[in-house]
Amino acid sequence: MEAPREECELSAVEPRVVAGVGKVESRGVDFIPESERHSKPSELIPTFIGAQFSLTVIVVGWLPIAFGLSWWSAVTSITIGVLVGTLLYAPFALFGPRTGTNSAVSSGAHFGVVGRLIGSFLALFSALGFYALCVWTGGEALVAGGHKLVGTPEGDGMYVLGYALMAVATVIIAVYGHATVVAAQKFVIAAIGACMLIGVVAKFGDFDASYAGGEYLLGSYFATWMVAAVSAASLPISYGPFANDYSRYISSRFTGREITWANGVGIFVGSWVVMIFGAYMATMFPADAATWVAGWVAISPTWYMIPILLIALLGTFAQGAVCLYGTGLDFSSLFPKLERVPATLALSSIGVALVYLGFFAFDLIDSVSAFVVVLVVVTTPWMVINLLGYLLRGGWYDPAALQVFNQGERGGIYWFTGGWNLRALAAWVPAVVVGLLFTQTTLFTGPWATKINGIDMSFLSAAVIAAVLYLLLVRIFPEPREVFGPVSAPTSAPRNVTVDGEPAAVGAQETS
């Protein structure tokens, strides 16, 4: 098997130029050589803070209140949920600098180069769901805010048009790629942050910290609090399949500690601040508010419609672009003739179709709560297995071998059994099944959900079972020696070098 040929730091071939801000990125999921790694860990902070500054995340912050929790119960469920999700998500950005590619392709080291399809599916599921929700809420705010501000029509036709406008604007940013997405997030943080702060101050006189909530969604306090916490945890976890879209551009000279901290700070701060804002506003909504946007518009003065419209527009750009960019990047690798840009356009069309289907056929609260709970159940065990594999391998990866499937070839050290690592697969599938059996949402309830007084154990059970089974299976059926790298693999930060024009395997670096 011929390894993929990439120009790396010490290659004599002229390095490929990476597109900057305002230029369309040409890279897909192929290996990013050191000469093109222009990013720093600190850039992960604004990228993932900005990605949370959107109506989508604000809506997730509304869920604890919509579920019937009090203000302080909403705060605790959001804080603990986001913290737990962040602890799992933060180290996931370590793969990119080692493998030079995205999360799904990197997972091929542990699930097999064909088994990375699981990561691709999770990325697709997460991105389409959040992208649809992003366009949905952004379009609704555009129509409802415009109606209150200047009296524009508010019928179904206007909503259809509003969703289309949101989708087109989001696609434009996603098509340009990594540099433009990162630059856009920095502007979004300042603009939307100011709009939210104005809203907090404007409504401070109406806010009541003793807000006691209402009827519990799942019938009891602890069951409802747990599903709210799981919903909050789903935000950081949902970015696992996308974390390395950005960290793959980080130079290998940075330590694992720098990358992990930056990744964790970005996702925690962004998620917590925006979700708390959503809960804060929701405590003042009228009882008949059908959606977060409707409630927000109802309680806001007319002059505040301008900040609402800015949040709708800029927030949809920020998060929608992250969702589309990452999924288009990965989806294009599954079809050799499909490049990143047309893949992004195709996925956008599917996302918009989901928006229209959701608008005319489904209930927003039920759909969002079920989506985020299922998302965390299927994604968590996948992340746990990859992180454990990272620790067991000491962070050593062969970038060339990871690209085999993408190039339509076979073989290599990550081929395992027909391209699948059955150890990882045999740990992930039972974990997901058990997690779903414990799941309890307003759309469906697993048969085991009531066995522990209705408390949602889906997230925790899936994580624990995946960890135990994977460690047990690799102990009983040891993985091939070559996946652990040379016996003398370096323990300091590796250099990306070439051997006859081909990328050498990447050794371990400091991760503490």
Image (cartoon, rainbow, N blue to C red):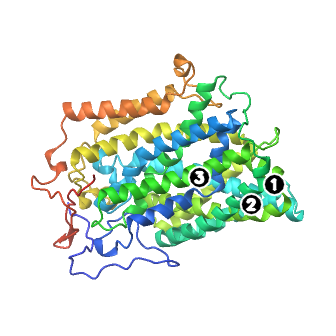
Task: Say what secondary structure mark 2 lies in.
Answer: helix
Query: Height in image: 23 above or below 343?
Result: below
Determine which residue is flagged by label 3.
273
Q: Nearer the viewer, residue 81 or 36?
A: 81
Label 1 is placed on what type of residue? Ser
Task: Return the disc, 3 or 2, that comes first in the chain's sequence.
Answer: 3
In three-dimensional space, the C-alpha distance between marks 1 and 2, rounded to whole angstroms, equals 9 Å
- How many residues crowd around disc 2 within 10 Å: few (fewer than 14), some, or many (20 or more)? many
- Residue 399 position in % (x across, y down): 26, 60
Q: Nearer the viewer, residue 379 or 285?
A: 285
Task: Say what secondary structure mark 3 lies in.
Answer: helix
- Residue 171 position in % (x across, y down): 59, 66
Q: Which dot marks residue 112?
A: none
- Residue 272 position in % (x across, y down): 56, 49
Rendered-image quadrant of the N terminus: bottom left
CB-based contact (under 8 Å), mark 3 and mark 1: no
**Image side of residue 347 versus residue 295, left or right:** left
| Image depth: mark 1 or mark 2 in front | 1
Query: Height in image: 2 above or below 501?
Result: above
Using the rendered image of the protein, determine whether residue 403 is visible from the camera's viewpoint. Answer: no
- Residue 441 position in % (x across, y down): 61, 31
Determine which residue is flagged by label 1.
300
In three-dimensional space, the C-alpha distance between marks 3 and 2, rounded to whole angstroms, equals 17 Å
In three-dimensional space, the C-alpha distance between marks 3 and 1, rounded to whole angstroms, equals 20 Å
